[in-house]
């Protein structure tokens, strides 16, 4: 079937494929830099710690800022549309002695901004509350040690300043995600105290009068992590309550809940509460394992909620890290899978289906929900890719394999 034939078929159910292509081209997803080097960063060679574990030893990991920038740029060339790049604070670039995190500044990220301007992407940011001597016991902003808390409070404030710098230079608001791994391996004797300390530390960070038009902070919850299996300070309930009180956003991560929970079902409640939803797209397998996202039911359900409630109301970023496969391919596959599911959701006539739901016509709703799954979305995807000048099918993999042979395997 050609695109023109697909366009006519969709028109019969009230779907304008041209509008879908235009709408999809407007969605900028934030591509996470840490897939490129296994969450290593440029401070030490010790690797990730603090509840984060990357498995695998595939060759070609980025070792320097320039290698990571090159890999990101190549990945983006295989992805349709114009997107963003999400940096962690540990990816600051240092000349000589490493600047510690409580003293990081815009200067450490000037090369990233220069690269972003050249590449045409915008930047988002994350404080890095892990993989550091001051987080060795698994506690940062909730630590009972005032010295530790002060260090990380300063880090959080510096990250807000760096976000302001990104927004000013790139003329685009910078989303800043605060995720802390704080918690305990075994049952704590005191659950309230760490959360009170966490809230007090966050209060001190957000007391900094950041430019609210330039910086959009959000706080991320988590069920558990490696080494903090029994108690996580920033639980879902804590984060929801704190974010509402502080008038910031709470962030949903697809991997940070019980596997039997529907993250998609939470989205509408978040939108009603906060007016905007910050979202990390990931894939848990057994636990929060951050696998590369696939076109599965969970991803499809979340994409449908994003489309039905308006993509303009969402801040979407990818978040996974797999060192067992080609890292560039992991970026490209994940991003394209997200875009495909968004497009499929745009090609469903939700208004008549909703009318059936409200009228109690559940048989018709079920039948049409299933039939629409087999409409020719692939032809619309192919047209979208053609207009963006990228491969629509698996031909992009051959380019990654050539890049691996010519670049990655020589590292």
Image: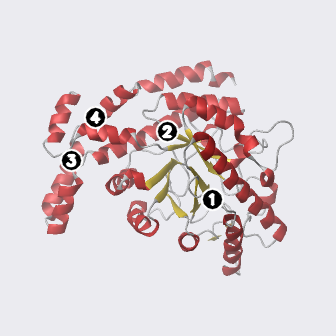
The spot of residue 121 in percent (x, y) is: 54, 36
Of marks 1 and 4, which one's residue comes earlier in the chain? 1
Q: Residue 178 carries which label?
A: 1
Residue placed at 57% from the left, 30% from the top?
A: 119
Quadrant position of residue 353? bottom left
Q: Residue 323 versus residue 330: which sits nearer the camera? A: 330
Q: Could you tell me how far apart the alpha carbons at marks 3 and 2 are, in whole angstroms? A: 29 Å
**Residue at x 75% of width, y 39% of height:** 93
In the picture provided, is 197 more to the left or to the right than 146? left
- Residue holding disc 3: 372
Q: Which of marks 3 and 2 is in front?
A: 2
Q: In this view, does 379 lie to the left or right of 273?
A: left
Tell me how far mark 2 sits from mark 1, CA to CA: 21 Å
Nearer-N-terminus badge (4/3):
3
In the rendered structure, the answer to whether residue 154 lies left or right of residue 358 reads right
Circle 2 sits on which residue? 83
Of the two numbered discs 1 and 3 on the same chain, state the one appearing first in sequence. 1
Q: Residue 99 at x, y = what percent?
A: 82, 46
**Helix or strand or loop: what does disc 4 sit on?**
helix
Which of pointers 1 and 3 indicates the residue nearer the eye?
A: 1
Badge 4 is on which residue? 380
Q: Tell me the distance, in whole angstroms, between the alpha carbons under discs 1 and 3.
A: 39 Å
Question: Residue 239: horizontal and vertical position, in percent?
Answer: 57, 69
Compared to residue 330, the image places residue 406 above or below, namely above
Circle 2 residues within 10 Å: few <14, some 14–19, many ≥20: many
């Amino acid at each position: 079937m050609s695109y023109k034939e697909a366009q006519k078929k969709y028109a019969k159910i009230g779907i304008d494929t041209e509008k879908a292509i235009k709408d999809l081209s407007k969605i900028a997803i934030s591509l996470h830099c840490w897939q490129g080097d296994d969450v290593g960063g440029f401070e030490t060679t010790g690797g990730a710690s603090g509840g984060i574990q990357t498995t695998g030893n595939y060759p070609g990991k980025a070792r320097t800022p320039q290698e990571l920038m090159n890999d990101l740029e190549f990945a983006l060339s295989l992805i349709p549309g114009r997107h963003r790049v999400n940096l962690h604070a540990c990816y600051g670039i240092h000349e000589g002695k490493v600047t510690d995190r409580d003293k990081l500044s815009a200067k450490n990220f000037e090369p990233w901004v220069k690269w972003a301007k050249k590449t045409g992407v915008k930047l988002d940011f994350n404080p890095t509350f892990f993989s550091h001597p001051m987080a060795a016991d698994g506690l940062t902003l909730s630590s009972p040690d005032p010295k530790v808390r002060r260090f990380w409070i300063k880090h959080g404030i510096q990250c807000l300043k760096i976000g302001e710098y990104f927004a000013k230079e790139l003329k685009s608001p910078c989303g800043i995600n605060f995720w802390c791994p704080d918690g305990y391996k075994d049952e704590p004797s005191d659950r309230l105290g760490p959360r009170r300390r966490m809230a007090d530390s966050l209060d001190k960070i957000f007391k900094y009068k950041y430019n609210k038009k330039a910086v959009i902070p959000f706080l991320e919850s988590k069920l558990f992590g490696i080494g903090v299996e029994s108690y996580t300070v920033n639980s879902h309930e804590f984060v929801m309550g704190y974010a509402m009180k502080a008038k910031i956003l709470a962030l949903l991560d697809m991997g940070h809940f019980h596997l039997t929970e529907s993250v998609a079902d939470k989205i509408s409640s978040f939108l009603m509460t906060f007016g905007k939803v910050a979202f990390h797209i990931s894939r848990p397998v057994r636990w929060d394992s951050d696998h590369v996202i696939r076109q599965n039911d969970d991803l499809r359900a979340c994409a449908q909620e994003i489309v039905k409630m308006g993509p303009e109301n969402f801040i979407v970023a990818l978040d996974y890290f797999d060192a067992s496969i080609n890292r560039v391919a992991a970026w490209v596959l994940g991003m394209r899978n997200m875009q495909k599911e968004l497009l499929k959701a745009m090609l469903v006539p939700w208004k008549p289906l909703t009318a059936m739901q409200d009228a109690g016509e559940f048989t018709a709703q079920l039948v049409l929900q299933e039939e629409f799954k087999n409409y020719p979305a692939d032809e619309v995807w192919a047209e979208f890719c053609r207009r963006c000048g990228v491969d629509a099918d698996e031909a992009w993999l051959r380019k990654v394999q050539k890049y691996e042979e010519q670049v990655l395997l020589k590292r």
